[in-house]
Image (spheres, rainbow, N blue to C red):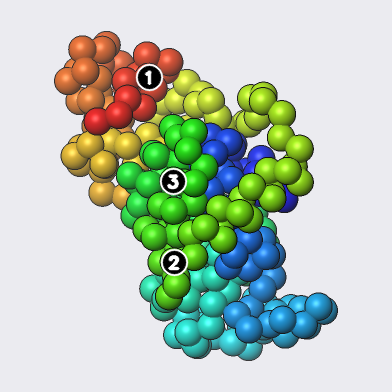
Amino acid sequence: MQEIYDFLRGQGMTHAGALGVMGNLQAESGCEACRLQGDYEISRARSREYAAKVDSGEISRHVFSRDAMGWGIYQLTYWSRKEGFYDFCKEKGKSIADLETQLAYLCKEMRTDYFSLFSFLGNTNEMFTACKRVCEEFERPAINNVQARYAMALNIEKELKYKEKTVASKYWPPRMIDKNMSGPDVEVLQAILKARGYAINYVSGKFDDLLESQLKAFQANSGLDSDGVCGPLTWAKALERG
């Protein structure tokens, strides 16, 4: 649990936002990365076998993405999302059962396709609302059992014995970033500018020429020095609620 919590906080989520996500993960998979839908055996032998076959290629990309079996910590099911996750794992050279890879893909999906939700999770102090929004907007289960997911989040909070403190992270609070740098904070900047209507065509995590030009435009429109460097003043303006 602590590893998941620290990862989500490191991606910029508040305490309430991270626990809102975790309550949903607990409901979906018990917060287990190696978890196949319907595998209730304590050994999780079916889940481990499934992961091994996908990793080795015995289960192909096509079959994995279209078997309609929920997989992983947030039970990816829809074919295009499973296909994207499969490609993400192959690009990273990681198993489909790797926890950090699954969490990274979760955050990638949120930044790219659910940016309003991701932004909310980075600002909220309302754990119940975080649980509700993640359930209804991101997980979208057949039954929106929000109250149960909230109860799970509260139990996780007790388990973690949370103390008010800032979680140290390599990438958050954001670094000063500029051209040729890369990382999750670059993804955040790309997603913010894209959501604000700037000509960002993709969220790659790489600070390229396109990002530099659009950042300069954003800085000019915000009354900042158009130097193409995202430092504290630019981050503060970018993270303002639109």
User: Which residue, given by chain and number where applicable, does mark 3 sit on?
Assistant: 129
Q: CA distance from mark 3 to mark 1?
A: 24 Å
- 76 or 26: nearer the eye? 26
Q: Amino acid under label 2?
A: Asn
Q: Is residue 168 visible?
A: no
Dot label at residue 154: none
For marks 3 and 1, the one nearer the N-term is 3
Q: Position of residue 118 (x, y in %)?
A: 41, 44
Task: Measuring from the top left, give residue 19's x and y in whole percent.
Answer: 58, 45
Tell me the kind of residue under disc 3: Thr
Where disc 1 sits, the SS reads: helix
Q: Give the percent coordinates (x, y) of residue 228.
A: 32, 22
- Per the image, label 2 sits on a secondary structure element best described as loop
Number of numbered discs: 3
The C terminus, quarter of image: top left
Q: Position of residue 42 (x, y in %)?
A: 81, 78
At 49% from the left edge and 46% from the top edge, which residue is drawn?
128
Residue, disc 2: 144
Outermost residue on the right side: it is 43
